[in-house]
Image (cartoon, coloured by chain):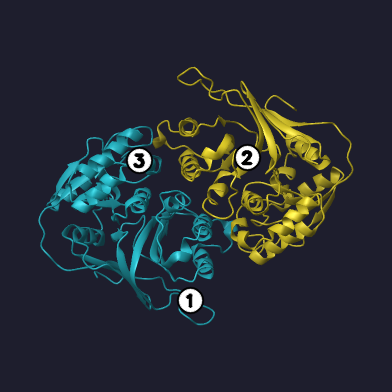
Chain colours: A cyan, B yellow
Amino acid sequence: MHDADGGCCGHTHAQGPRHIYIYSPSSAVRDKPAFKRGIARLKAQGHEVEVDADALAVHTRFAGDDATRLAAIHRAAASGADVALISRGGYGLGRLLPQIDYAAVAKAVERGTEFVGFSDFTAFQCALLARTGARSWAGPVLTADFGAADGPDDIMLDCFEDLLSGHGEGSGWRMNKEAPGADGAPAVPEIYVQDATLWGGNLAMLASLVGTPYLPDVDGGILFLEDVGEHPFRVERMLTQLLYAGVLAKQKAVVLGQFTEYKLATHDKGFKLQSVVNWLRTQIQAPVLTNLPFGHVDTKVLLPMGAKVSLSVEGRDALIYWGHTH
Amino acid sequence: MHDADGGCCGHTHAQGPRHIYIYSPSSAVRDKPAFKRGIARLKAQGHEVEVDADALAVHTRFAGDDATRLAAIHRAAASGADVALISRGGYGLGRLLPQIDYAAVAKAVERGTEFVGFSDFTAFQCALLARTGARSWAGPVLTADFGAADGPDDIMLDCFEDLLSGHGEGSGWRMNKEAPGADGAPAVPEIYVQDATLWGGNLAMLASLVGTPYLPDVDGGILFLEDVGEHPFRVERMLTQLLYAGVLAKQKAVVLGQFTEYKLATHDKGFKLQSVVNWLRTQIQAPVLTNLPFGHVDTKVLLPMGAKVSLSVEGRDALIYWGHTH
């Protein structure tokens, strides 16, 4: 672990250069300087960076029309790269779900290509897991993370290099300080869960898949969630959908990441994100963890979506551990 | 019909005063002057207005805590009123869905109480229809509609009085002017549908019920949708959920109401609500109608949620007709 607030656990190790394929399945890349900085940064790390022919395509708000973005996904799957990294999220993957060749993607994963991204990418990751059981990684994108103007976040970089070397073993973090419950019990009890499927991502994308063939049916899983620009009442509404659909009752733990860039209103009169967390704890048996370093923030760990992991909580310290994945 | 842009069809008629019960199942009433104006207006129409004891309750952003709002719903059902009218929408009904005594509400409907509202109320209406088949009305609320500062909208008032007298028979309106398709065919073909279940309401609420026990399983229905403050890409994402869940394929028509108060961004580069309408038409066989006078706008017709209706389209003129409902 790199610091008290969160980080990756892994062995130190040497590694050779890796082949990274950059493609754009969602919104059009608008910040070209960030795109270039991201590529330069990956190259400076010693990696071979291959950029998809349509990575900078534009069709209204999308990175090319549906056929273009679909073909880009399939080229990423055929690339033989070590990592297929999206340029950015935004919106657009949801439109493509019925047309994606999931078997081809799963085969690429089997051959060693790790698909990495988050936000809108959650739709792809969920559908891939639902359709094939193949693993992907919730993690950074090219522009906002590697291309950040003030340089990529150190913890994110370490986690990414751990992934590339196959030596990542887990992520630990410190949860929010919360008042104990009415019975004096801690907000999050000490727990130890083994062999649970880790899954999740962006809450809005995940909720938008409920009732469709693209939501994985994960039993006894550990569900992690994050979102951006969603008022707590909307977060609650989305959690309510997962609750009423029976998704939450099947999980061994719900792990809340970062919920950012929303604005409370004066008429909220005390209703806030913590209200939603407190409410959620009255609705499900499973513990609800907080403050996972993942979401629309710089410091994000990488998480193996669809992998078996163990989870432990001791006081405010939480650890998701998957051992070697290679 | 009252004018070229939309209105109710009904017989002229005399009617006695009606008993209207006002209650607050969702957000707290903030605009008290509008609340008072609305009540005064209904009384001026000759109606007896009964105000629930907790209609002005406040608990953070809600009109009282969950138990308070739940009790208010059940008091409305026990009131014996002709109409149970919500003070306003907002947010809060979704939290209550598992605890509502739907049989009691359905019994009230059978005894002649019409439940009226929209927006957040869609959750209640969907759940009631799913659980009991009981009808309710998509229509106005007290504060924003009857309590509007410049007076209630005439068409809304007429439709409401038609409901009270039991003489409403349908609603007609003029659809948007749209370019014909590539084959020269009109955007909305001439159609005539009979004996179809009318249902729908607020798209965000409806989409949030997909995969839960509270979404009615309507086959061969006519689905009407409206929303406020949702960017077209979010509207598309919600429609995508209904599409992938198989809801849209089961409808004989999708009727789009008013989608208002969203902001396009420069990076949308031509992606707009019409793009979503065009896309939707490539995804389903059923016709997609536009411009139903219903939504977060002053001029709204009343629509019998869960009733059998007929629908006709001729050129830009559309008509939903249910004949007498009493």
Position in image of residue B225 (x %, y %): 59, 40
**Outermost residue, bottom side:** A184
Q: Chain of mark 2?
A: B
Q: Are marks 1 and 3 on the same chain?
A: yes
Q: Chain of mark 1?
A: A
Q: Residue at x 31, y 46 (%)?
A: A102
Lower sequence index among marks 1 and 3: 3
Label 1 to label 3: alpha-carbon separation: 41 Å
- Residue type (three-letter) at the residue carrying disc 3: Ser
Pointer 2 with pointer 1, Cβ within 8 A = no
Mark sitting on residue A27: 3
In front here: B8 or A193? A193
Helix, strand or loop at label 3? It is: loop
Label 2 to label 1: alpha-carbon separation: 42 Å
Q: Residues within 10 Å of mark 2 (few under 14, many from 20)?
A: many
Q: Which residue is mark 2?
A: B295
Residue A162 picture quarter? bottom left
> Residue A318, can we see it?
no
Mark sitting on residue B307: none
Q: Are marks 3 and 2 on the same chain?
A: no
Q: Residues within 10 Å of mark 1 (few under 14, many from 20)?
A: few
Give the quarter of the figure containing the C terminus of chain B: top right
Can you tell which of label 2 and label 1 is closer to the viewer? 2
- Residue type (three-letter) at the residue carrying disc 2: Gly
Q: Chain of mark 3?
A: A
Residue B153 appears left or right of A11: right
Q: Image height check: is A143 above or below A219?
A: above
Mark sitting on residue A179: 1
Position in image of residue A227 (x %, y %): 42, 55
Helix, strand or loop at label 2? It is: loop
